[in-house]
Image (spheres, grey):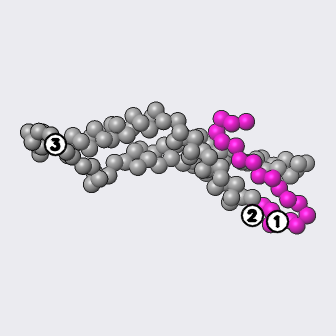
Amino acid sequence: TVKAGINVSKNWVSLDEDTHTIAIYLPQVQVEEAVVNAGTLEYIFEDPKYNTETVAQEAYKAAIAHLQRRVKDDSKIIEIATDNAKLVERALVEPWVNQVSDDTQYTVRVIGYGEE
């Protein structure tokens, strides 16, 4: 399991009153430590001599190392987490700000870290 997300307390918001546009700038996505559920690991031994008392510990360590390498090299995790954060921010803010006034509707733009 890999969790990624943003610290919403670090969001930065600007308002352009002329265009009725609210821009929300998101902080960089942070990837939490990868977690391997040891109970889901399965072992198949072609040679019974490898079925030792320490095989579970060794397999668990290897699985964590493998997952950490994959997370580090996978830019899609950051991309997907950023896209999800943008969708959530817009879904939370847009309906709320557009209930403030019947006369003025706002456009909400959510900008991910490093985007213009």
Secondary structure found at label 1: loop
Asked if disc 2 and disc 1 are in contact, CB closer than 8 Å, the reply is yes
Provide the residue designation for mark 2: 96
* Left or right of 107, for residue 39: left
Give the tally of numbered discs: 3
Disc with the residue nearer the chain's start (1 vs 3): 3
Highlighted magenta segment, given as a residue range: 95-116
* Left or right of 96, for residue 44: left
Residue 10 appears anywhere in the view: no
Provide the residue designation for mark 1: 100
**Residue at horizontal 24%, vertical 42%?**
59
Identify residue type, mark 1.
Answer: Val
Residue 47 drawn at (x, y percent) = 11, 39
Q: Nearer the viewer, residue 12 or 60?
A: 60
The label number, if any, that marks residue 45 in the structure image? 3
Look at discs 2 and 3 and give the one toward the viewer. Answer: 3
**Residue at horizontal 66%, vertical 42%?**
112
